[in-house]
C-alpha cells in the first residue's frame, strides 16, 4: 500500500473517530441508582410499582452528518473502505436509536445493531431463543450447584483492590484505573483507560476472576491495541457492530480460564428469554418476577430487568435487545476459532485482538495484517498465546457433543456383581 493511500485512509479513519466519540449507548441508557431502592421499597411493601426512569432527549445531527460524509467517501471495492463504511453506519444506527429512547423505533434500531431472540445463529442453526431454552432445560436440575449468592459478599472496594493487583503487572506502561460507580446497572464496564464496577453490590471471589478475564483482558486489552494502530485507530472504538464479537470473546475467555460458573451461564440464557418476554408485552414487574423465580436475588433481579428495559418502555413491547449477543457471540467465536485452527489459519485468532472488530473483519483485512498496515496485537490474553491448549479445548468440546451419551446414567458406571464361581 503506497503512502498516499495510507494517508487517505488514515484521514478518513480520523474523521470517523472524531464523529463517533460522542455517540455513546450504555451511558445514555443508564438508570439512576435510586430506582433500585424505590422499587424494592414498594415490592417489600407488597405494592409493586413500575420504575419511572428518566428519558434523555439527545440529538446527534452533526455527528450523523459527518459519519455519513465518511461513508460517502468510502471505496466499497476495497476491504478497508468496507470496514470504515460498516463501522460508520453502525454508529449512525446507534445515534438514531439513542435519539428515539422509549419509542418503537428504539427497539427496531436495537434489533438492527444486536439482533433479536428469534434471529438464527449462523446459517440453518438454532435461534438465540432456542439456544437459551435448550441450555436452561439442560441445566434446570443443576441450578443449585455452588454456594447461594447471599452466602458470599465481597464489597466493591475490596474487589477494586484485587482487580488493580491483577491488572498492574500486565499493563505496566498502560495504567488502567478501577472506579466504583454507584449508578451502573451492569456489574462492570471497561475501556482503554479505566474499568468501572457497580457500587453497593455484593461480589464473590468468582466475580473477580470473571471481571479480570472478561472486562480487562478482552475489552480493555482490545481497546488499547486498537488505539495503537498506525492507520485504523477506529479499531480502538467500541463500535456497535463489534459488540457480538466482543462479548463472545469475553465470555469465551471466562469459559477457557475456568472463570465462568453455571449461574453465570444461566443468567446469559435467562436474559434472552426475558428480552422475548418484553417484546411480547411483559412489563418490568413481570420480568422481575421471572428473574426472581429463576433464583436471582431481589437486587440482581432488578438489575437484570433494568438491562432489558433501559432505553425502552417499562410497560413492555419497547426493549433493549443487546443481551442476545452473549450466547450468540460465544457460539460464533467458538466456531470461528475451531474453523481457523482446522483450516490452518491460527493467525486469525491473534488478529482478533489487534483491536475491536467483528469476526469477518480479520478475513476481509487479512492482506493488510500480512503487509503490516494493521499492526499485530501488542497485548494478548495468556490463553490465546497457548494455542495447543486452546486447540485441545476446542476440538474436545466438539468431539464430546458428537458422542452418543445422552442415554447413559450414573448407574451404567457400576460394575456388575461378580460371579462367585463354582
Image: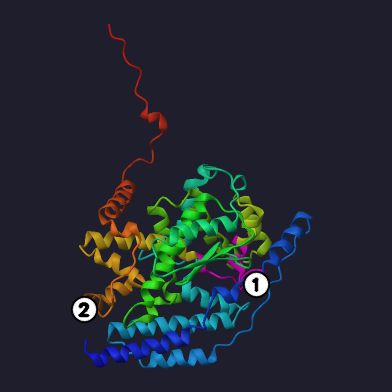
Query: In this figure, which residue is indicated by the disc labeled 1?
Result: 313
- Left or right for 143, reference 383: right
Query: Which type of secondary structure does the marked residue at label 1 adopt?
Result: loop
Question: Is residue 56 in view?
Answer: yes
Q: Is residue 292 magenta?
A: no
- Left or right for 388, reference 379: left
Quadrant for the C terminus in the image: top left
Instruction: Look at the image and give the residue range highlighted in magenta.
Output: 304-323
Position above or below: 248 against 138: below
Query: In this figure, which residue is indicated by the disc labeled 2?
Result: 371
Tell me if label 2 and label 1 are in contact, CB under 8 Å. no
Query: Which type of secondary structure does the marked residue at label 2 adopt?
Result: helix
Marks 2, 1: nearer the viewer: 2
Quadrant for the N terminus in the image: bottom left
Count of marks, rendered view:
2
Position above or below: 63 against 270: below
Residue at 62% in and 55% down = 290
Real-space Cα distance between discs 2 and 1? 49 Å
Query: In terms of depth relative to the viewer, which is nearer, 20 or 144?
Result: 20
Residue 199: image location, x then y, percent: 62, 62
Amino acid at each position: 500500500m503506497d503512502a498516499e493511500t495510507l494517508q487517505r485512509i488514515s484521514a478518513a479513519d480520523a474523521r470517523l473517530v472524531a464523529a463517533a466519540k460522542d455517540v455513546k449507548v450504555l451511558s445514555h441508557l443508564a438508570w439512576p441508582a435510586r430506582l433500585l431502592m424505590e422499587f424494592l421499597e414498594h415490592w417489600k411493601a407488597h405494592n409493586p410499582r413500575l420504575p419511572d426512569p428518566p428519558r434523555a432527549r439527545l440529538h446527534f445531527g452533526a455527528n450523523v452528518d459527518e459519519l455519513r460524509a465518511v461513508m460517502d467517501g468510502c471505496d466499497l471495492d476495497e476491504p478497508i473502505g468496507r470496514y470504515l463504511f460498516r463501522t460508520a453506519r453502525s454508529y449512525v444506527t446507534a445515534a438514531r436509536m439513542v435519539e428515539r429512547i422509549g419509542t418503537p423505533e428504539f427497539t427496531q434500531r436495537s434489533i438492527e445493531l444486536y439482533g433479536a431472540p428469534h434471529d438464527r445463529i449462523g446459517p440453518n442453526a438454532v435461534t438465540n431463543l432456542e439456544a437459551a431454552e435448550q441450555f436452561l432445560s439442560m441445566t434446570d436440575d443443576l441450578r443449585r450447584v455452588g454456594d447461594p449468592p447471599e452466602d458470599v459478599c465481597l464489597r466493591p472496594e475490596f474487589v477494586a483492590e484485587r482487580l488493580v493487583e491483577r491488572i498492574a503487572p500486565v499493563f505496566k506502561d498502560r495504567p488502567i484505573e478501577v472506579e466504583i460507580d454507584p449508578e451502573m446497572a451492569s456489574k462492570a464496564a471497561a475501556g482503554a483507560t479505566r474499568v468501572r464496577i457497580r457500587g453497593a453490590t455484593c461480589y464473590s471471589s468468582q466475580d473477580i476472576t470473571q471481571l479480570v478475564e472478561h472486562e480487562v483482558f478482552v475489552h480493555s486489552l482490545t481497546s488499547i491495541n486498537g488505539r495503537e494502530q498506525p492507520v485504523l485507530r477506529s479499531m480502538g472504538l467500541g463500535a456497535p457492530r463489534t459488540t457480538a464479537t466482543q462479548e463472545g470473546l469475553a465470555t469465551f475467555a471466562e469459559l477457557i480460564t475456568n472463570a465462568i460458573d453455571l449461574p453465570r451461564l444461566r443468567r446469559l440464557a435467562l436474559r434472552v428469554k426475558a428480552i422475548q418476554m418484553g417484546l411480547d408485552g411483559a412489563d418490568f414487574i413481570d420480568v422481575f418476577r421471572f428473574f426472581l423465580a429463576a433464583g436471582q436475588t431481589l437486587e440482581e433481579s432488578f438489575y437484570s430487568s433494568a438491562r432489558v428495559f433501559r432505553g425502552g418502555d417499562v410497560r413492555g413491547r419497547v426493549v433493549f435487545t443487546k443481551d442476545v449477543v452473549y450466547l450468540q457471540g460465544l457460539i460464533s467465536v467458538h466456531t470461528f476459532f475451531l474453523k481457523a485452527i482446522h483450516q490452518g489459519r491460527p493467525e486469525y485468532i491473534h488478529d482478533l485482538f489487534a483491536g475491536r472488530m467483528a469476526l469477518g473483519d480479520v478475513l476481509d483485512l487479512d492482506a493488510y495484517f500480512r503487509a503490516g498496515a494493521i499492526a499485530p496485537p501488542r497485548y494478548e490474553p495468556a490463553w490465546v498465546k497457548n494455542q495447543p491448549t486452546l486447540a485441545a479445548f476446542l476440538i474436545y468440546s466438539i468431539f464430546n457433543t458428537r458422542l452418543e451419551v445422552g442415554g447413559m446414567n450414573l448407574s451404567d458406571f457400576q460394575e456388575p456383581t461378580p460371579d462367585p464361581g463354582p
